[in-house]
Amino acid sequence: MQQRYEALTYIAPQVSTLPDPVLSLNGMNLPWDSFDLQQEPMTQLQLGVSQMFPFPGKLSLREDIAVFEAEAALHSVEEMRLNLDMNVSITWWEIYFLDRSIETVLSNQGLLRQFIDIAKKKYEVGQGLQQDVLLAQLELSKFLDQEVQLKSMREQRVIRLNVLMNVTPEQSVQLPSVMPVFTGTIASESELHQRALAARPILMEEKASISASESRLALAKKDYYPDFMVGLGYGNRQEDDLGRSRQDFLSIMLSVNIPLYTGTKQSQAVQQRARELAKSRYSLVDQRNMVLSSISSAVTGYEQAKEQLSLYSGGILPQARQTVQSMLAGYQVSEVDFLNVVRSQVTLFNYELQYWKSFTEINQSIARLEAAVGEENVYE
């Protein structure tokens, strides 16, 4: 995309330059019977040059079109950079979430093995049931299956991240095991909207496209006016049969094309360019609405994930851990059914995953927000 932009920058000088002049060499009024240059007085060898001059304003409009198209291409490069940054960040955080999920699964596998040992000991002394052992083994098998699935998902995300980073797909990716909890404050939604309207490259691209369409329409209207061809010719005549010299000729030419079929050519072109301009304006409105809605969606996702993270870390997870410990202690003295112990542990596992999901979604929402606004600073 960068190379496409650079290629477009070379168009403006081309289209704003006059057409190449035409050099002509002619033999005029040659006698058919002899081709003798001295036989007829009007026979001459002519050297001429002609130049096409478009109607005033056409060249500058063509230059404007090329400049605006190159500007739009430059903004499209910046838009792609934003999307690439966002996709890298989102994929990075997906891998981080999967790493924490795998750690959680392994931790719960260890706890289930402890449950199995406790259930076996109670069964051996006649205080427990064999079904408790089988139930714990079944839940352990489920965790083992989840471990396999999570590792497979991680491999897929690593491949995607490597492709985005332009490295070999099989290259390993090791992320830090601990990341700080986001403590910043993002700007208000209305302020982010204003920043996006001023900075988002895709909106700048649409505006440049509108300018190019306006120039195309103006150029189509200019085609109602003719172009000019100016020519200059010098005709050399030979001496006559008696050796007397003949006066050379100088020819001047001015010609114009006649816009005779305006109803089916120029008028139709003007209507075409007018509709294209309207399309570009509607496209800007559409993109503007999409940008603003993506910002609102990212802000909503951020606020929701932030509230959930606070809820899980401050209330749900400590309570769930205490419930598991209480249930396990009660089971060891035969006051709690083993099924309830297992259910409480599975519930704790799901809450732990939701905690890390919320942790990840906060950072992913910020990445989406930065891409939607068009700048890295989305904070107050």
Image (cartoon, rainbow, N blue to C red):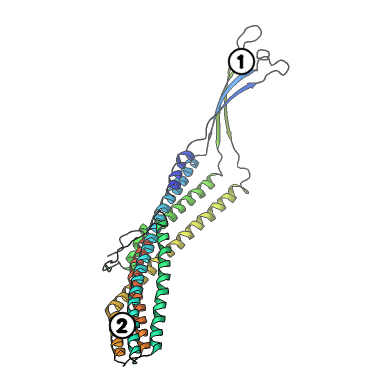
Which image quadrant for residue 342? bottom left
Q: Is mark 1 on a helix, strand or loop?
A: loop
Q: Give coordinates of residue 13: x percent, y percent.
A: 45, 39
Q: Residue sitting at 48 percent across and 41 percent down?
A: 57
Amino acid at pointer 2:
Ala
Above or below for 38 versus 56:
above
Q: Crowding at label 2, few (<14), some or many (≥20) Cα neighbours within 10 Å?
A: some
Tell me: 292 left or right of 19. Answer: left
Q: Give coordinates of residue 269: x percent, y percent.
A: 57, 49
Q: Give coordinates of residue 189: x percent, y percent.
A: 34, 68
Q: Can residue 193 be seen in this view?
A: no
Q: Crowding at label 1, few (<14), some or many (≥20) Cα neighbours within 10 Å?
A: many
Outermost right residue: 33
Residue depth check, mark 2 versus mark 1: number of the one nearer the observer: 2
Q: Mark 2 points at which residue?
A: 320
Which image quadrant for residue 108? bottom left
Q: What element carries label 2?
A: helix
Q: Split into 4 quadrants, where in the image is the C terminus?
A: bottom left
Depth check, front residue: 114 or 63: 114
Q: Name the residue under label 1.
A: 237
Depth check, front residue: 155 or 80: 155
Looking at marks 2 and 1 on the same chain, the residue that comes earlier in the sequence is marked by 1
Q: Residue sitting at 41 percent across and 84 percent down?
A: 134
